[in-house]
Image (tube, rainbow, N blue to C red):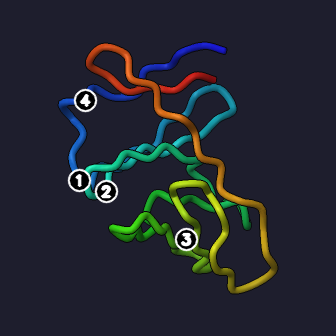
Amino acid sequence: MQYYGLEKLMHLSDGYRKVFKIDAHELMLTQIDGQRFLIEARCPHRGLSLEHASISVSGQLQCPHHHYQFNLHDGRLEAHSEEPCRSLRVYNIVYEGNEVGVML
C-alpha cells in the first residue's frame, strides 16, 4: 500500500467536495457538519458520478441519477428505486502532517 495525499487540512470546511483520480480509483472527499468522508466517486448501481449527490447532515448520500441512498459512515445501501446494488466503498482517511490522504 502507498500513501496518496489529497488535500491540505486548511482547505477543508463544511460543504467541501472534490473528486480525485488515483490510478484506477476515483474517490470523492467531502466534509459535512465537521465530519470528513472519503468514498468512491461513482454510484455502485450504474457507475454514474456522485459529484452532485445530495448529502444530509446525518451522513446520508442520495445519488442524483436514480435516488439510491447510502450511509456515508459504512457505505450501506439504505434505499433503492430499482434493483439493489452493493454497498458504497468507504475509504479510511489518513492524516499526515497538515494534509489528509488515503492508503491504496
At mark 1, the secondary structure is: loop
At mark 4, the secondary structure is: helix
Real-space CA distance between mark 1 and mark 4, rounded to the nearest whole angstrom: 12 Å
Real-space CA distance between mark 4 and mark 3, rounded to the nearest whole angstrom: 27 Å
- Which of the marked residues, 2 or 4, is nearer the chain's N terminus? 4
Real-space CA distance between mark 1 and mark 3, rounded to the nearest whole angstrom: 19 Å
Real-space CA distance between mark 3 and mark 2, rounded to the nearest whole angstrom: 16 Å
The residue where tag 2 is placed is: 32
The residue depicted at 52 percent of the width and 55 percent of the height is 73
Please report contact status of discs 2 and 1: CB closer than 8 Å, yes or no.
yes
Classify 10 Å Cα crowding around label 2: few (below 14), some (14-19), many (20 and above). some
Q: x, y (%) of residue 20?
A: 48, 36
- Which of the marked residues, 2 or 1, is nearer the chain's N terminus? 1
The residue where tag 4 is placed is: 9
The residue where tag 3 is placed is: 63
Please report contact status of discs 4 and 3: CB closer than 8 Å, yes or no.
no
- Which of the marked residues, 4 or 3, is nearer the chain's N terminus? 4
The residue depicted at 65 percent of the width and 56 percent of the height is 88
The answer to which of 78 and 65 lies nearer the viewer is 78
Give the residue type that dot 4 points to.
Answer: Leu
